Image: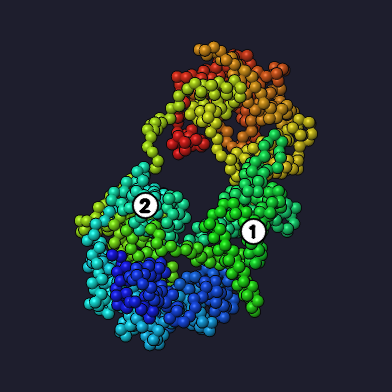
Amino acid sequence: MNFLEQTARTIYANHGPRLDDVWVILPTRRAVTVFLEYLATQSERPFLAPHTLAIDDFIMQAAGVQLIDPVSLLFELYEVFREIDEHLDFEPFIGWASVLLADFDRIDQYLVKPSYLFDYLTAAKALERWQASIPEGATITETTGTARYFQLFENLHAAYQSLHARLDTQGLVYRGMGYRRLAEQVETLVRDNMAYEKLYFVGFNALSRAEEQIIKVLLEAKKAELFWDADVYYMNDWGQEAGEFLRRYRESGWLFNRDNREQIGNDLLGTPKNIQIIGVPTASMQAKVAGELCKGGGQGGDDVAPDSVLSAPGSPPSRAKTAIVLADETLLVPVLYALDESVTDLNVTMGLSLRNSLLFTLIDGLFEMQRTVHEFRTRDGRDLRIPKFHHKHVIKILNHPFVRQYERIRGLMSPDEVNELPKPLFSWLVEKIVNEQRAYLTEAEMRELGQHDPLVSVLFTRWPNEHPRRVIELLYDLIDQLRAVYRETQDAIEIEYLYLFYTLLKQLETTLEREQGKEGAMQVTLRSFRQFLYELIRQTTIPFTSEGNSHIQVMGMLETRGLDFDRVIILSANEGILPQTRKLNSLIPFDISTAPDIRLPTYREQEAVMAYHFYRLLQRAKDITLLYTTSPDAYGMGKGEKSRYIRQLEYELIPKSGQINLSYPVVRIGKSYDRPPINTDWQIAKTGKVMESLLRNLTEKGLYPTALNQFVDCTLKYYFARVVGVGEEDDLEEKMGVAEFGSWLHLALETLDKDFRMLNKPVNEDIVQEVLETTFKEVMQGRVMESGLNLLMYQTAQELMLNFQRRQAGLTGLEVLGTEQKLETTIEVPLPAGPIRVKIAGKIDRIEKYNGQIRIVDYKTGTVKLPGDRAMDQAAEKLPVETGSDWGKARQLWLYKYLYLKSDLNRDNLPVTAGFYSFRDKDGALKTNTVRFSEEDTPEAYVQASEAVLAGLIQKILDPEQPFVRTSDLKTCAFCSYKRICGRE
């Protein structure tokens, strides 16, 4: 028989059928509902029910006070501290106010003498302030921050008394204050009050000192009784933390008496149970497993569906009362979505936090974007500052599900562009930001890109730092714009979230208006407003409507108090979650909390309480499933292991019982298939489709120096880049990268050659700087160069370009013939299936004439290193096989010279050489190292030998017997874009 059912039977037997003067006090409101259901079954005739209340409701009602709401309590505390320190700012206050209020609550619940505690705390902080290790005669300079820190502790007692006085005048209390009020006046308010004839306290475990005082007075007056829910397993084992409080009460003699010692059952060791322990990789997968275990719940189906991913031996019927208990309450939404459609009989006995909603992620993204707004001075030196949004936050907002849903509902499309089909507006906008490298965007730019859509205007309006009411107005506008999304989705939970958020804003707006009307009103900044709002959101939950007869209950661990279930599924049974990590957010140090005359609860008591809840939940359950995550990343460092409670079950409880069947089911996702073995050698065969792609590439697109170097360095790299076309995803980086730096200088040099040198126009340093600025805007687009690394890079580019200009000016008779010129030719390559013609191509940075010689030039912003002269004499043997950047550059020069000699440009039969202008070289000379195939170094011999080498390389590329393989030269992998794919990272 369930605990509450047995209790209801006993109370009815003692007082029925008239119970209107009886009071039954239980730990939770859920327990109240269940108790009344059991009590109703005790008689077939109607009868007056007892006054049945949750403990918090009873305390407030008996004390004759009203609980203050969290918003008003924070402002009351702020007013208290403003009276003590008129210079106190709201922003730092909101950071520690909630911690202090929690301490006040504990102080009152445990009836700690405030004067003693705060004097003790002040003395401890004074000792902390007095540093005995400082040499005699030395002085300590105290900063404003440290002075205010110690002043806070000195004022705590005055603040505590003042807060009590302010609330007393309004008939309001915070929770702990209400408990202290009743404990101190229990004789007059309850004991001597004829309305309280008999009180039963049912299902409690760890009582606060205020609760102990209340119950003790009523027990001595014979007006109260207690019904305990305990088990011999943890009551008789002094090493088991679950029974710590109950054993203490038993030893005291006044809470456990002879009449109720029989309430200690033997369910954990004496009744048959099936326990499953299941490890899964991720937190969200626990929800899927729980949903699978409950499949068919509410319709009286089989225990577990035959094709279930789990085996569940001995599972009770699906109509058995089942509790899904969430040690991590953030899993509530995943669990609700994971439950099968057949689960219609469901009750959620916990609040759903507003922090877990999609709406909160949007609001949080907006606050983060506003927090990181950058301001830039105008380029002309004026003091005018232009605020701009960072691209990462803009893209995050545009990709939010609500924003994309709004885009779909409104049918928003991109503007018409030449040769491009319209795209969804926000998708197009994200692509445009990335493609055009717009690192920072103004309000005006966002409105223009968003085609002045009202949602875009609301999302990307700059929030004023000193006017939170304006922010509230904008959030109202956001809610108005999102209404269409909510109407379309019809998501009841998200609609409730929206309403809850709206009421929070209204409450904040009213409070701010009231506070602003006072003399010396506080200054609420955007940052403090955010802290305040987030604290309220943290405390705000959606209360679900209770359905007492539901066979599946979803609840947190604290909501299980006093309740029994046939089947229990506990999620997040990980150490650090169940029980929680040992930490206590408090201004009161641990050693003071444990002092004999104070004795405030610490993490030790918290762990004992949680252990009791865990074992009490298991007492009468027949089927128990414990889910935990196996990955440390699921809950953070140190939380990827089983809870100690699982270990205690395995090594302590089960060996003592003999009636518990323990199993470890394995989760299977979907059906198993025979998968091909993983290719660890990374050999890609040249199949028919691959050969078709290779031929098309070589004959149509052509073989460029970059592709040729990829093939020689690593044939697998060539396969990824040229055959399957694996490329890196476009991204936006506001800091200038090495590649972009080079592209910018290349464009600047091309512009100077095309617009000036090739037209015989003079080039000076002013022109160089002007071209640099113009090309920066073209290449870098949204990036800024006024600050940070980009400014340093810009200054470096200026210095390099000006030095290059000075060296070029010293080359008398230099003539630029071409810039960024693409050259191509074809060669015939013999193959077993017949000859093919392959295109050879390259894009040359500059062709120049100097001292009667044609020079093929490539620009390099980095260091240039080429093979030595002796190696170049063996070019025919080394060019097709040597890897590394030096030989890659040699192949580039070799192909450029070959392409020029084959082109129509080689009409004057002048000597031709190829080389690099390296911006790293101080002398600025053209760095060359001529490839030589033979003693006969004529253009015709060079072309003929080059084509022989190229034909051999192309034959290797097209040889079906030679697969693409991973290089053995690990140096080649250092900067490869594909090293993560092939496992070389």
Q: Which residue is mark 2?
A: 300
Q: Quadrant of residue 44?
A: bottom left
Q: Is residue 661 left or right of residue 363?
A: left
Q: What residue type is disc 1 on?
A: Asp
Q: Quadrant of the N terminus?
A: bottom left
Q: Position of residue 211 (x, y in %)?
A: 37, 77
Q: Quadrant of the C terminus?
A: top left
Colour mapping: rainbow
Q: Position of residue 72 (x, y in %)?
A: 55, 74
Q: Is residue 210 visible?
A: no
Q: What residue type is disc 2 on?
A: Gly
Q: Is residue 937 left or right of residue 210?
A: right
Element at label 1: helix
Residue situated furthest front in the rendering? 45
Q: Which residue is mark 1?
A: 480
Q: Quadrant of residue 853?
A: top right
N-terminal of the two: label 1 or label 2? 2
The residue located at (38%, 81%) in the rendering is: 21
Front in this rendered view, residue 155 or 487? 487
